């Protein structure tokens, strides 16, 4: 029977989470857009793929697949970044439904940072670091600086769902109003006129006095990535927008008045009104060490140095082979703890942005690029270090002599002081005798 992939997602054909790799899949697939709790996998099902892990209906299907069809692999896709409020403070999500633990054999994580968090929730051996295939084209592009402009152009954006209850919404709105007020009061930064672009969701644009737009369906709006091409920096609420912006090479701050734990630590965070001035000024002239930290954060939380699509296909095909082996033995599937191995063998790669000269611009020796001159200077330094033992020995001899002289001086001082005391005592006795006479 030919292998066949089943996708449990009613909108998979329109979602970049799936359509970014489905056309490259070397196997036939079927998108199941009307599955219910009682859905049964057809006999030719070689693997089940879905990202739907949040509703009771989805979890019930996954649990039943794992128990009733133990030889059919189940792969769950992480559909974006992990966000603390979405995980722990979302009234619409049942407790534990955010992969705590995973109801599936494997989960395709977007990066090592996400994998570590999910493993801490009881998913050891289930996490595979894949990346996001829909970001492959973006990751393959060379990050270009923004076009030259005398203005400081700033994009302010919010997540597709910036809040999960009324209190959170009010907090997000307050943070945006504080930012808007500060920007209105500071029309220039470092002598550059500030030009802002606002891409807000969930009615926040109306709350701030802007015209209402649907950032997803409004055809008049430029795509977000095109907007990023023409700005110098980005401020966003926690969202995959952060990853896109950093991939574009833009200094990016997270606006988060909730001050929630950051599963993805940014180089710049605005968690209070008092942070706005310092952060916006640094975004206009970002320190190189913070850009390096931002780049490090990106590569820890999004596997993007090579093709995520190839890793996804490799994972699916390997899981299918594991399922076949289990079916032949009539046993539950056994997977390697890691199917997709790291080309860096678990080590973090040295990033291109680690430039010692740029990180320490005031250190002259890091600016020298003449290898021959540096070799001569290094050789002289080594020769000088070779002389140090003799020099230190000479200094020790001199120090010993000085200490001996000091000891003699102390002894002489004590004798002079004793003679003075004796002379004083004799003087006092003589004075006393003369007074009696």
Image (cartoon, rainbow, N blue to C red):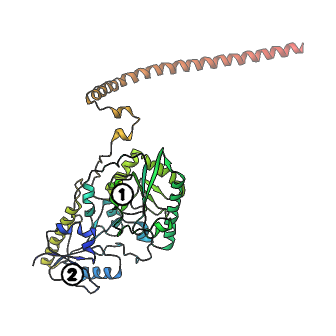
Mark 2 Cα shell of 10 Å, populated few (<14), some (14-19), many (≥20): some
Q: Secondary structure at mark 2?
A: loop
Mark 1 Cα shell of 10 Å, populated few (<14), some (14-19), many (≥20): few
Residue 143 coordinates in the image, percent (x, y): 30, 51
Res 358 quadrant in image: top left
Quarter of the image with the C terminus is top right
Whether 344 is drawn above or below 401: the answer is below
Q: Which mark is residue 301?
A: none
Q: Extreme bottom residue here?
A: 38
Residue 8 coordinates in the image, percent (x, y): 25, 77
Whether 274 is drawn above or below 126: the answer is above
Between residue 163 and residue 198, name the one nearer to us. 198
Q: Residue at x 55, y 21 (%)?
A: 407
Q: Residue at x 36, y 56 (%)?
A: 228
Residue 366 coordinates in the image, percent (x, y): 35, 35
Residue placed under numbered mark 1 in the picture: 227
Q: Extreme left residue here?
A: 1
Residue placed under numbered mark 2 in the picture: 69
Q: Extreme front residue here?
A: 220
Left or right of 310 on screen, residue 79 = right
Nearer mark to the viewer, of 1 and 2 = 1
| Upstream in sequence: badge 1 or badge 2 | 2
Whether 168 is drawn above or below 63: the answer is above
Q: Residue at x 35, y 81 (%)?
A: 56
Between residue 297 and residue 102, name the one nearer to us. 297
């Amino acid at each position: 029977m030919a292998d066949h992939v089943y996708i449990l997602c009613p909108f998979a054909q329109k979602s970049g989470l799936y359509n970014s790799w489905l056309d490259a899949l070397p196997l036939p697939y079927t998108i199941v857009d009307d599955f219910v709790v009682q859905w049964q996998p057809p006999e030719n099902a070689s693997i089940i793929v879905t990202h739907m892990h949040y509703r009771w209906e989805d979890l019930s299907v996954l649990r039943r697949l794992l128990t009733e069809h133990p030889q059919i692999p189940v792969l769950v896709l992480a559909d974006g970044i992990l966000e603390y409020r979405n995980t722990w403070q979302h009234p619409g999500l049942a407790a534990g439904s955010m992969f705590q633990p995973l109801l599936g054999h494997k989960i395709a994580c977007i990066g090592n940072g996400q994998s570590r968090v999910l493993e801490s929730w009881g998913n050891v051996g289930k996490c595979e670091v894949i990346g996001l295939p829909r970001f492959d084209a973006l990751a393959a592009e060379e990050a270009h600086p923004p076009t030259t402009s005398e203005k400081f152009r700033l994009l302010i954006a919010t997540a597709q769902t910036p809040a999960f209850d009324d209190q959170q919404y009010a907090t997000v709105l307050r943070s945006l109003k504080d930012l808007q007020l500060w920007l209105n009061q500071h029309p220039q930064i470092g002598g550059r006129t500030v030009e802002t672009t606002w891409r807000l969701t969930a009615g926040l644009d109306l709350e701030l006095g802007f015209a209402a737009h649907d950032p997803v369906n409004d055809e008049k709006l430029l795509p977000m990535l095109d907007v990023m091409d023409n700005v110098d920096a980005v401020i966003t609420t926690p969202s995959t927008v952060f990853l896109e912006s950093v991939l574009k090479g833009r200094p990016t701050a997270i606006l988060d008045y909730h001050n929630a734990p950051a599963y993805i630590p940014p180089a710049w965070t605005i968690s209070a009104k008092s942070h706005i001035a310092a952060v916006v000024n640094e975004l206009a002239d970002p320190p190189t060490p913070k850009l390096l930290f931002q780049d490090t954060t990106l590569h820890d939380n999004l596997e993007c140095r090579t093709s995520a699509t190839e890793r996804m296909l490799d994972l699916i095909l390997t899981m299918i082979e594991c399922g076949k082996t289990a079916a032949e033995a009539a046993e539950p599937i056994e997977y390697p703890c890691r199917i997709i191995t790291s080309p860096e063998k678990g080590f973090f790669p040295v990033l291109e942005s680690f430039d010692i000269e740029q990180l320490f611009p005031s250190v002259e020796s890091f600016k020298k690029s003449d290898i021959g001159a540096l070799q001569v200077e290094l050789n002289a330094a080594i020769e000088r270090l070779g002389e140090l033992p003799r020099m230190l020995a000479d200094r020790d001899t001199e120090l010993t002599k000085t200490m001996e002289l000091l000891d003699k001086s102390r002894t002489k001082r004590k004798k002079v002081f004793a003679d003075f005391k004796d002379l004083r005592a004799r003087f006092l006795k003589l004075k006393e005798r003369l007074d009696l006479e």
